Every structure is written in structure tokens, then in C-alpha cells.
Amino acid sequence: MSAKAPPAVGERLPEKEIGPFDAEALRRYAEVSGDDNPLHLDDALAASIGFSAPPVHGMKLLATFEPMLRAWRADLELVGLGGTFVQPAPRGEKLVLTGRVLRSSQESVFVRLYAHGSARAPAIIAEATLRPSKQEV
Amino acid sequence: MTTDGALEFPSLRVRVDAARAAEFARETGFDGAFDGAPSCYPAVWLTTPTIHGAIAQVCAQADSVPVHESQHFAYETPLRVGEDYDLSVSMRREEKPLRLVVEALLATLSGAPVGRFETRLRLVPRAALRRDAAA
């Protein structure tokens, strides 16, 4: 079976809407990840430092890019994922994940990713590096 | 932490636990059919008491709150569910702005490199947070 062609530079990934995440979703993530920073769980603490609601864990949001990437190109394997947490995403807000291919070859694909909430600036600016999977898809 | 602000932890034996990986996947948007190890799963190892405690201690000394600034995962080979690995973690403090950088190297038990991870935590002084909230 011939390998699928690499994506074209400039190709946009299908957008994905995630959330809104409620307090229970943040509690579950805190439990499984071990990140029990009260800032994400305690309304009073978040309010005391100026947040309208506790922010969603940045790590939880960054991790949601992987299923998006897999849904887009299951024949590519994720070998690098990183991001900068630019803006807090308050609990209870929907976010939209977007992505665009910036570099592409037979060996690797580099994708710029964004998570946008209602704020003007993105919540996360991220990047992913993918390679053709060695496994049959 | 040493005077130059660096700290190396003893190597940790870690495992991609199948049940925890499945739960982590569920909470980060994977569908139920996914049975692998999410690339961000190693975040759970950085919350082990040794590392978490060291971060908390630095924050307390600086009277600061850690704010997750950035996170990176890079892999030589895929993570495998059920596998044991050795995780080497080091931490250094940077000034101006005050932050902690946690770096981790993951290797197989025979020493073959698997991945490297970097966590950057901005340490925001509590006094500044109180001032911002009052403004």
C-alpha cells in the first residue's frame, strides 16, 4: 500500500470546538493528572486574584490538540507537541482549536496550532511535529 | 536547590499505567477507541511528591504562585502503555522574570532515549497578584 502524500503547506486543519468545561471536568482532570493547583478548582481563590472564574488547566487544553491531529491525519505520528499559555481560559467557556501546516516534507510535518476562547488573544499558541507513522493505519 | 539555582532529582522509575492513561485520554478529548499513551501523559509524572514538593518549596520561599507558562514534549520513540521507564528530572530557577524551568529526560530501562520534556513556570509574587486584583 502506498503512503499517503504529505499535507500541503498552508493546509488548514478542520476546526474543533471543545468545552465548555465545568467544575466537575476540572476536578476530574486534577485527579487524573495530579495537578491539584487550587487556582483551577477554587472559585474564591481565583476571584481573589482577579479571575472571573477558575482557569482551565493549560496542560488539559494543550493535550486536546493530539486527538484533533489524529482525527486529521491518522497516518502521521506525533513526535513533538509544545505550547505557550498566553491567556487563561476561564471555566465555562467554549474554545476553538485551529491549525495550519507551516512546513511539510516526506520526513516531517510542522503544524502551528491555536486555541481561542472569547478573548482577542489566543489561550494557547502551540506547535506540533509529526512524522509518517511506522505502523500500518 | 544549589546556589546557582539548579537541582537534579534522583532518577525516577515511572510507568505508563493503562487505567490512568485511559482516564487521561478521556479527560483530554480522545474518543473511547484510543488505547495508547497520550503524548502529554508524562505531565502526570511531574506531579509526583518529590518534584511537586520541590516546586512548592521554591514558590513558598519566593512567596509566589506558579503559573504554567509553556510546556513541550518531544519523542524519539512512542510511549508504550504498560512500559517502565527511567525519568531524569532537573530544575533550575531563572531571575528576571522569576521562573522555574523543569527539564526531564525519559529513557528505557536499558538507557535508550525515548523523550524529553520541558515545563516553564512563571513565579508570580503574591503581592503583585493582590495588587492586580485590587486595581
Image (cartoon, coloured by chain):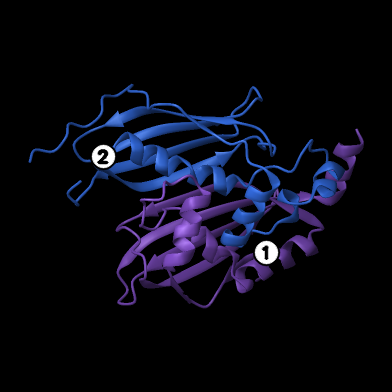
Quadrant of residue A15 within the rendered picture:
top left
Give the quadrant of the C terminus of chain B: top right
Residue A68 visible at all: yes
Left or right: where B134 falls relative to A90: right
Residue name at image x 67 percent, y 64 percent: B55
Task: Chain letter for mark 2, please.
Answer: A
Type of amino acid at the residue the image marks with label 2 = Ser
Answer above or below: position of B37 versus A136.
below
Question: Vertically, is B45 above or below B12?
Answer: above
Residue designated by label 2: A108
Which residue was labeled with disc 1? B55
Q: Residue at x 34, y 41 (%)?
A: A70
Residue A10, picture quadrant: top left
Q: Is residue B73 depicted above or below A15 in this figure?
A: below
Residue A15: numbered disc: none
Q: Determine the secondary structure under disc 1.
A: helix
Q: Colour of chain B?
A: purple
Q: Residues within 10 Å of mark 2 (few under 14, many from 20)?
A: some
- Give coordinates of residue A85: x percent, y percent: 60, 40
